[in-house]
Image (cartoon, grey):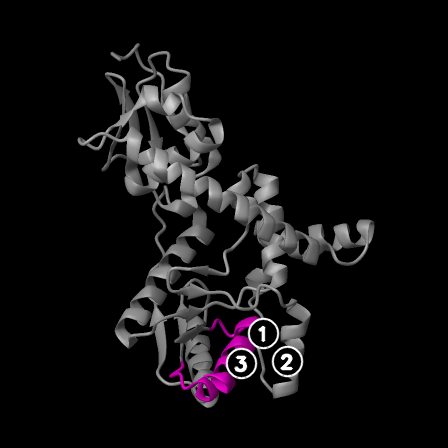
Amino acid sequence: MLAACSGGADSLALAAALAHEAPRCGLRAGGVTVDHALQPGSAGRAREVAGALTGLGLEPVACLRVAVSREPGHGGPEAAARTARYAALADAAHRTGAVAVLLAHSRDDQAESVLLGLARGSGTRSLAGMPSSRGPYRRPLLGVGRATLRSACESLGLRPWDDPQNADPAFARARVRHQALPALESALGPGVAEALARSARQFRADAEALDELAAAHAEQARGADGAWEAGLLAGLPDAIRTRVLRQAAVAAGCPPGALTAAHVGALDALVTSWHGQRWTDLPGGVRGMRQRGKLLFTAGHASAPGGRGTSEGPVGRD
Protein backbone atom coordinates (compact mmCIF):
# COMPACT_ATOMS: atom_id res chain seq x y z
CA MET A 1 0.00 0.00 0.00
CA LEU A 2 0.96 3.65 -0.45
CA ALA A 3 0.79 6.63 1.89
CA ALA A 4 -0.06 9.85 0.07
CA CYS A 5 2.00 12.63 1.62
CA SER A 6 2.01 16.39 1.02
CA GLY A 7 4.65 17.04 3.64
CA GLY A 8 2.14 18.43 6.13
CA ALA A 9 1.90 17.17 9.71
CA ASP A 10 -1.12 14.97 9.08
CA SER A 11 0.31 13.10 6.11
CA LEU A 12 3.81 12.83 7.63
CA ALA A 13 2.30 11.24 10.75
CA LEU A 14 0.34 8.84 8.55
CA ALA A 15 3.45 7.90 6.55
CA ALA A 16 5.39 7.29 9.76
CA ALA A 17 2.60 5.12 11.15
CA LEU A 18 2.48 3.07 7.95
CA ALA A 19 6.27 2.64 7.93
CA HIS A 20 6.10 1.39 11.53
CA GLU A 21 3.11 -0.93 11.24
CA ALA A 22 3.43 -2.40 7.72
CA PRO A 23 6.45 -4.67 8.42
CA ARG A 24 4.75 -5.99 11.53
CA CYS A 25 1.73 -6.95 9.42
CA GLY A 26 3.79 -8.48 6.64
CA LEU A 27 2.86 -5.71 4.21
CA ARG A 28 4.97 -3.82 1.68
CA ALA A 29 4.55 -0.08 2.15
CA GLY A 30 5.52 2.81 -0.08
CA GLY A 31 4.80 6.51 -0.38
CA VAL A 32 3.77 9.02 -3.03
CA THR A 33 3.83 12.80 -3.14
CA VAL A 34 2.26 14.97 -5.82
CA ASP A 35 3.68 18.26 -7.09
CA HIS A 36 0.80 20.39 -8.41
CA ALA A 37 3.24 22.99 -9.77
CA LEU A 38 1.02 25.80 -8.48
CA GLN A 39 3.50 27.50 -6.13
CA PRO A 40 7.10 28.68 -6.52
CA GLY A 41 9.55 26.05 -5.32
CA SER A 42 6.99 23.25 -5.40
CA ALA A 43 9.31 20.86 -7.24
CA GLY A 44 12.02 21.22 -4.60
CA ARG A 45 9.55 20.69 -1.77
CA ALA A 46 8.19 17.58 -3.47
CA ARG A 47 11.72 16.16 -3.65
CA GLU A 48 12.19 16.91 0.05
CA VAL A 49 8.97 15.10 0.90
CA ALA A 50 10.05 12.13 -1.19
CA GLY A 51 13.36 12.10 0.70
CA ALA A 52 11.50 12.14 4.03
CA LEU A 53 9.36 9.20 2.93
CA THR A 54 12.46 7.26 1.94
CA GLY A 55 14.03 8.15 5.27
CA LEU A 56 11.06 6.61 7.06
CA GLY A 57 11.82 3.33 5.30
CA LEU A 58 9.02 3.41 2.75
CA GLU A 59 9.73 1.75 -0.59
CA PRO A 60 8.90 2.46 -3.37
CA VAL A 61 8.54 6.22 -3.19
CA ALA A 62 7.07 8.16 -6.12
CA CYS A 63 7.31 11.91 -6.71
CA LEU A 64 4.78 12.87 -9.36
CA ARG A 65 4.28 16.22 -11.11
CA VAL A 66 0.83 16.99 -12.51
CA ALA A 67 -0.67 19.65 -14.74
CA VAL A 68 -3.72 21.25 -13.13
CA SER A 69 -6.37 22.20 -15.67
CA ARG A 70 -7.27 25.86 -15.89
CA GLU A 71 -10.13 25.26 -18.31
CA PRO A 72 -13.63 26.39 -17.23
CA GLY A 73 -16.05 23.74 -16.07
CA HIS A 74 -13.70 21.98 -13.62
CA GLY A 75 -15.05 23.57 -10.44
CA GLY A 76 -12.29 26.10 -9.75
CA PRO A 77 -8.61 25.68 -8.90
CA GLU A 78 -9.16 23.56 -5.77
CA ALA A 79 -11.40 21.07 -7.56
CA ALA A 80 -9.07 20.97 -10.59
CA ALA A 81 -6.07 20.30 -8.35
CA ARG A 82 -7.97 17.54 -6.56
CA THR A 83 -8.90 15.91 -9.88
CA ALA A 84 -5.28 15.98 -11.05
CA ARG A 85 -4.02 14.67 -7.70
CA TYR A 86 -6.37 11.70 -7.60
CA ALA A 87 -5.51 10.80 -11.18
CA ALA A 88 -1.83 10.77 -10.20
CA LEU A 89 -2.50 8.68 -7.08
CA ALA A 90 -4.50 6.17 -9.11
CA ASP A 91 -1.66 5.94 -11.63
CA ALA A 92 0.90 5.41 -8.85
CA ALA A 93 -1.21 2.65 -7.31
CA HIS A 94 -1.54 0.94 -10.69
CA ARG A 95 2.18 1.13 -11.49
CA THR A 96 3.29 -0.13 -8.08
CA GLY A 97 0.57 -2.74 -7.67
CA ALA A 98 -0.64 -1.12 -4.44
CA VAL A 99 -3.93 -2.49 -3.15
CA ALA A 100 -4.70 0.70 -1.23
CA VAL A 101 -3.72 4.36 -1.03
CA LEU A 102 -3.86 5.89 2.45
CA LEU A 103 -5.04 9.51 2.74
CA ALA A 104 -4.33 11.62 5.83
CA HIS A 105 -7.63 13.49 6.26
CA SER A 106 -8.22 14.06 9.96
CA ARG A 107 -11.27 14.59 12.14
CA ASP A 108 -10.79 18.35 11.70
CA ASP A 109 -10.78 17.99 7.92
CA GLN A 110 -14.04 16.08 8.18
CA ALA A 111 -15.62 18.80 10.32
CA GLU A 112 -14.53 21.44 7.81
CA SER A 113 -16.06 19.44 4.96
CA VAL A 114 -19.39 19.22 6.78
CA LEU A 115 -19.47 22.98 7.42
CA LEU A 116 -18.58 23.74 3.80
CA GLY A 117 -21.32 21.42 2.57
CA LEU A 118 -23.82 23.03 4.93
CA ALA A 119 -22.88 26.54 3.81
CA ARG A 120 -23.20 25.60 0.15
CA GLY A 121 -26.55 23.89 0.57
CA SER A 122 -25.17 20.81 -1.12
CA GLY A 123 -27.48 18.25 0.49
CA THR A 124 -27.02 15.11 2.53
CA ARG A 125 -24.27 13.67 0.35
CA SER A 126 -22.07 16.69 1.02
CA LEU A 127 -22.92 16.74 4.73
CA ALA A 128 -21.80 13.12 4.88
CA GLY A 129 -18.24 14.35 4.47
CA MET A 130 -15.46 12.08 3.29
CA PRO A 131 -15.86 8.29 3.38
CA SER A 132 -13.37 6.21 5.34
CA SER A 133 -13.09 3.90 2.34
CA ARG A 134 -13.89 4.27 -1.35
CA GLY A 135 -12.31 2.25 -4.10
CA PRO A 136 -8.57 1.97 -3.41
CA TYR A 137 -8.57 4.93 -1.01
CA ARG A 138 -8.53 4.62 2.79
CA ARG A 139 -8.77 7.38 5.38
CA PRO A 140 -7.67 5.80 8.67
CA LEU A 141 -7.28 9.11 10.55
CA LEU A 142 -10.83 10.50 10.34
CA GLY A 143 -11.22 9.89 14.05
CA VAL A 144 -7.94 11.60 15.01
CA GLY A 145 -7.58 15.32 15.71
CA ARG A 146 -5.08 17.49 13.88
CA ALA A 147 -3.34 18.51 17.11
CA THR A 148 -2.65 14.87 17.95
CA LEU A 149 -1.04 14.30 14.56
CA ARG A 150 1.17 17.36 14.88
CA SER A 151 2.26 16.18 18.34
CA ALA A 152 3.14 12.80 16.83
CA CYS A 153 5.45 14.51 14.31
CA GLU A 154 7.13 16.45 17.09
CA SER A 155 7.67 13.27 19.11
CA LEU A 156 9.22 11.54 16.09
CA GLY A 157 11.44 14.47 15.16
CA LEU A 158 9.66 15.02 11.85
CA ARG A 159 9.54 18.53 10.40
CA PRO A 160 6.26 19.11 8.56
CA TRP A 161 5.79 21.75 5.88
CA ASP A 162 2.86 24.10 6.41
CA ASP A 163 1.26 24.98 3.08
CA PRO A 164 0.61 28.76 3.08
CA GLN A 165 -2.61 28.18 1.13
CA ASN A 166 -4.03 26.49 4.23
CA ALA A 167 -3.99 29.89 5.93
CA ASP A 168 -4.94 31.99 2.89
CA PRO A 169 -8.39 33.57 3.48
CA ALA A 170 -8.95 33.57 -0.27
CA PHE A 171 -9.82 29.88 0.10
CA ALA A 172 -13.13 28.91 1.71
CA ARG A 173 -11.64 25.97 3.60
CA ALA A 174 -8.99 28.21 5.16
CA ARG A 175 -11.70 30.60 6.36
CA VAL A 176 -13.62 27.71 7.88
CA ARG A 177 -10.46 26.39 9.57
CA HIS A 178 -9.21 29.66 11.04
CA GLN A 179 -12.41 31.66 11.48
CA ALA A 180 -15.64 29.64 11.42
CA LEU A 181 -14.65 26.64 13.55
CA PRO A 182 -12.88 28.71 16.23
CA ALA A 183 -15.95 30.98 16.40
CA LEU A 184 -18.21 27.96 16.89
CA GLU A 185 -15.92 26.56 19.57
CA SER A 186 -16.00 29.93 21.32
CA ALA A 187 -19.79 30.18 21.17
CA LEU A 188 -20.74 26.55 21.81
CA GLY A 189 -17.79 25.19 23.74
CA PRO A 190 -15.16 22.58 22.85
CA GLY A 191 -16.00 19.46 20.90
CA VAL A 192 -17.65 21.05 17.85
CA ALA A 193 -15.26 19.37 15.38
CA GLU A 194 -15.85 15.97 16.98
CA ALA A 195 -19.64 16.48 16.90
CA LEU A 196 -19.56 17.49 13.22
CA ALA A 197 -17.48 14.45 12.33
CA ARG A 198 -19.93 12.24 14.24
CA SER A 199 -22.83 13.81 12.33
CA ALA A 200 -21.00 13.07 9.08
CA ARG A 201 -20.92 9.35 9.93
CA GLN A 202 -24.68 9.39 10.53
CA PHE A 203 -25.40 11.33 7.35
CA ARG A 204 -23.21 8.92 5.38
CA ALA A 205 -25.25 5.91 6.45
CA ASP A 206 -28.43 7.65 5.25
CA ALA A 207 -26.84 8.87 2.01
CA GLU A 208 -25.50 5.43 1.11
CA ALA A 209 -28.92 3.85 1.63
CA LEU A 210 -30.52 6.46 -0.64
CA ASP A 211 -27.78 5.99 -3.25
CA GLU A 212 -28.54 2.26 -3.36
CA LEU A 213 -32.23 2.98 -3.93
CA ALA A 214 -31.34 5.51 -6.63
CA ALA A 215 -29.16 2.96 -8.44
CA ALA A 216 -32.04 0.47 -8.48
CA HIS A 217 -34.48 3.04 -9.89
CA ALA A 218 -31.93 4.22 -12.45
CA GLU A 219 -31.92 0.79 -14.06
CA GLN A 220 -35.68 1.06 -14.61
CA ALA A 221 -35.68 4.65 -15.86
CA ARG A 222 -32.89 4.33 -18.43
CA GLY A 223 -33.75 2.92 -21.81
CA ALA A 224 -31.67 0.70 -24.05
CA ASP A 225 -30.73 3.79 -26.11
CA GLY A 226 -29.13 5.42 -23.07
CA ALA A 227 -31.87 8.05 -22.71
CA TRP A 228 -33.87 8.53 -19.53
CA GLU A 229 -37.66 8.36 -19.39
CA ALA A 230 -38.75 11.74 -18.03
CA GLY A 231 -42.13 10.41 -16.88
CA LEU A 232 -40.56 7.66 -14.81
CA LEU A 233 -38.04 10.08 -13.30
CA ALA A 234 -40.77 12.59 -12.43
CA GLY A 235 -42.63 9.93 -10.45
CA LEU A 236 -39.71 9.26 -8.12
CA PRO A 237 -39.39 10.89 -4.68
CA ASP A 238 -37.24 14.01 -4.78
CA ALA A 239 -34.42 12.46 -2.75
CA ILE A 240 -34.19 9.53 -5.17
CA ARG A 241 -34.72 11.45 -8.41
CA THR A 242 -32.00 14.03 -7.75
CA ARG A 243 -29.55 11.24 -6.98
CA VAL A 244 -30.43 9.47 -10.21
CA LEU A 245 -29.89 12.72 -12.12
CA ARG A 246 -26.53 13.31 -10.46
CA GLN A 247 -25.42 9.76 -11.24
CA ALA A 248 -26.58 10.20 -14.84
CA ALA A 249 -24.65 13.45 -15.26
CA VAL A 250 -21.45 11.96 -13.84
CA ALA A 251 -21.81 8.91 -16.08
CA ALA A 252 -22.16 11.29 -19.05
CA GLY A 253 -18.78 12.88 -18.24
CA CYS A 254 -19.39 15.65 -15.68
CA PRO A 255 -16.54 15.99 -13.15
CA PRO A 256 -18.16 15.02 -9.82
CA GLY A 257 -16.36 17.76 -7.90
CA ALA A 258 -17.69 20.45 -10.24
CA LEU A 259 -21.29 19.27 -10.35
CA THR A 260 -23.31 21.43 -7.96
CA ALA A 261 -26.83 21.31 -6.57
CA ALA A 262 -27.71 24.09 -9.03
CA HIS A 263 -26.69 21.88 -11.97
CA VAL A 264 -28.76 18.98 -10.66
CA GLY A 265 -31.65 21.37 -10.04
CA ALA A 266 -31.52 22.51 -13.66
CA LEU A 267 -31.71 18.89 -14.80
CA ASP A 268 -34.56 18.29 -12.39
CA ALA A 269 -36.47 21.20 -13.95
CA LEU A 270 -36.24 19.47 -17.33
CA VAL A 271 -38.05 16.54 -15.74
CA THR A 272 -40.52 18.09 -13.31
CA SER A 273 -41.01 21.68 -14.55
CA TRP A 274 -40.92 21.26 -18.29
CA HIS A 275 -42.01 24.40 -20.15
CA GLY A 276 -40.05 24.06 -23.35
CA GLN A 277 -36.56 25.00 -22.16
CA ARG A 278 -34.02 23.73 -24.67
CA TRP A 279 -31.09 22.49 -22.55
CA THR A 280 -28.84 23.00 -19.55
CA ASP A 281 -25.06 23.17 -19.85
CA LEU A 282 -23.10 21.20 -17.26
CA PRO A 283 -19.43 21.01 -16.20
CA GLY A 284 -17.07 19.09 -18.45
CA GLY A 285 -18.77 20.18 -21.67
CA VAL A 286 -21.84 18.00 -21.04
CA ARG A 287 -25.31 19.17 -22.03
CA GLY A 288 -28.61 17.80 -20.74
CA MET A 289 -31.76 18.25 -22.81
CA ARG A 290 -35.27 16.90 -23.09
CA GLN A 291 -36.62 15.53 -26.34
CA ARG A 292 -39.77 13.52 -26.95
CA GLY A 293 -40.28 12.76 -23.30
CA LYS A 294 -36.71 11.66 -22.69
CA LEU A 295 -33.72 13.21 -20.94
CA LEU A 296 -30.57 13.05 -23.08
CA PHE A 297 -26.93 13.88 -22.41
CA THR A 298 -24.46 14.95 -25.09
CA ALA A 299 -20.77 15.88 -24.77
CA GLY A 300 -18.34 18.26 -26.43
CA HIS A 301 -20.06 21.57 -25.59
CA ALA A 302 -18.65 24.66 -23.92
CA SER A 303 -19.18 24.60 -20.17
CA ALA A 304 -21.08 27.51 -18.68
CA PRO A 305 -18.74 29.23 -16.18
CA GLY A 306 -19.80 29.48 -12.57
CA GLY A 307 -22.77 27.14 -12.43
CA ARG A 308 -25.96 26.47 -14.27
CA GLY A 309 -26.14 27.42 -17.91
CA THR A 310 -29.72 26.95 -19.08
CA SER A 311 -30.82 28.09 -22.50
CA GLU A 312 -34.42 29.30 -22.52
CA GLY A 313 -35.09 29.04 -26.23
CA PRO A 314 -38.36 28.48 -28.03
CA VAL A 315 -40.66 25.84 -26.69
CA GLY A 316 -39.14 22.49 -27.53
CA ARG A 317 -40.88 19.45 -28.87
CA ASP A 318 -41.60 16.92 -26.14
Q: Can residue 287 be seen in this view?
A: no
Asked if residue 15 is among those painted magenta in the image, a careful observer would answer: yes
Residue 44, which numbered label? Answer: none
Q: Mark 2 points at which residue?
A: 152
User: For the residue labelled by badge 3, is the local secondary structure a helix, a strand or a loop?
Assistant: helix
Q: Name the residue under label 3.
A: 17
Asked if residue 62 is among those painted magenta in the image, a careful observer would answer: no
Residue type for callout 1: Ala
User: Residue at 48% across / 84% down in the picture?
Assistant: 19
Q: In this view, does 168 lie above or below 71?
A: below
Quarter-of-image position of residue 37: bottom left
Coordinates of residue 74 in the picture (x, y in percent): 38, 46
Q: Is the magenta stretch mostly helix, strand or loop?
A: helix
**Residue stretch rendered in magenta on the structure:** 5-29
- Marks 1/2 in contact by CB < 8 Å: the verdict is yes
Residue type for callout 3: Ala
First in sequence, mark 1 or 3: give its number.
Answer: 1
User: For the residue labelled by badge 2, is the local secondary structure a helix, a strand or a loop?
Assistant: helix
The alpha-carbon separation of the residues under discs 1 and 3 comes to: 12 Å
Q: Mark 1 points at which residue?
A: 9
Front-most of 61 and 166? 61
Q: Can residue 318 be seen in this view?
A: yes
Mark 2 closeness class: few <14, some 14–19, many ≥20 residues within 10 Å: some
The alpha-carbon separation of the residues under discs 1 and 2 comes to: 8 Å
- Marks 3/2 in contact by CB < 8 Å: the verdict is yes
